Amino acid sequence: MRHILLNLLLTSGLLAAFGPAASAQTAYLDSLRSWRKNYIENHELLKKPEEQALLRFYPLSADYRVACSFQPITGGGWIQIPTSGSKSLMARKYGRLTFRVHDTTLHLFVYQLQFLLGKEDTKDDLFVGFTDLTSARDTYGGGRYIDCVIGDIRNGTMILDFNKAYNPYCAYTSGYNCPIPPKENDLPVAILAGEKNYGKQTH
């Protein structure tokens, strides 16, 4: 009986100690599930249930929500970024993110796309595209994107959530000019989060 009571006391103490953190993690994962459900049901290109059923994702993981330091880049000129189609897009570097995944320090460049600056509802949008060791294997070879806006940068930091990495339209069909992430945004690790290849059962 003593051992049972002692175990109960220890368990209660652990729950009290880790309760707030566990609760926060549960709330975060619930928010991701809601985000993913909304992404699937309101997909801009895949409207039919049978099409949406072919969307594949990695399991949700808080390990892929990373705090990045943001270093602004000023005075950079416009460069051409190739696309999956016949056109290229004009872009300029807005800043560089530094963060850690799998105990590895990584960098991603954040870009502004020129054609978005001329529209009121997209003028604050930033382009964060990347490839990694899963690209052209478990994930789309042309890279994946994460939606970000200037307002996400606060006090020199920005949260990057790879669970929200998604495929461009070109992963599903042809006829679009999807920007291909520059080589400098090729991460030397496997990002096992976010969207996988469309319609393929990948491990």
Image (spheres, rainbow, N blue to C red):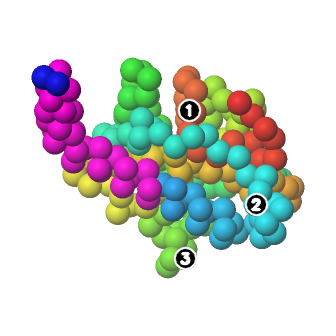
Crowding at dot 3, Cα within 10 Å, few <14 / some 14-19 / many 20+, comes out as few
| Mark 3 or mark 2: whose residue is earlier in sequence | 2
Query: In the picture, residue 203 is in which quadrant?
Result: top right
Answer left or right for 191 relative to 89.
Answer: left
**Amino acid, disc 2:** Gln
Residue at disc 3, secondary structure: loop
Residue located at (78% from left, 38% from top): 201
| Mark 3 or mark 1: whose residue is earlier in sequence | 3
Circle 3 sits on which residue? 119
Does 85 sit above or below residue 202? below
Mark pair 3, 2: CA separation: 29 Å
> Is residue 167 in view from this perspective?
yes
Frontmost of labels 3 and 2 is 2
Residue located at (81% from left, 69% from top): 48
**Which residue in the rendered view is the most extreme toward the front?**
1
**Amino acid, disc 1:** Ile
Measured as percent of width and height from the top left, residue 174 is found at 86, 55
Look at the numbered discs 3 and 2 and tell me whether their residues touch, using CB distance below 8 Å.
Answer: no
Circle 1 sits on which residue? 191
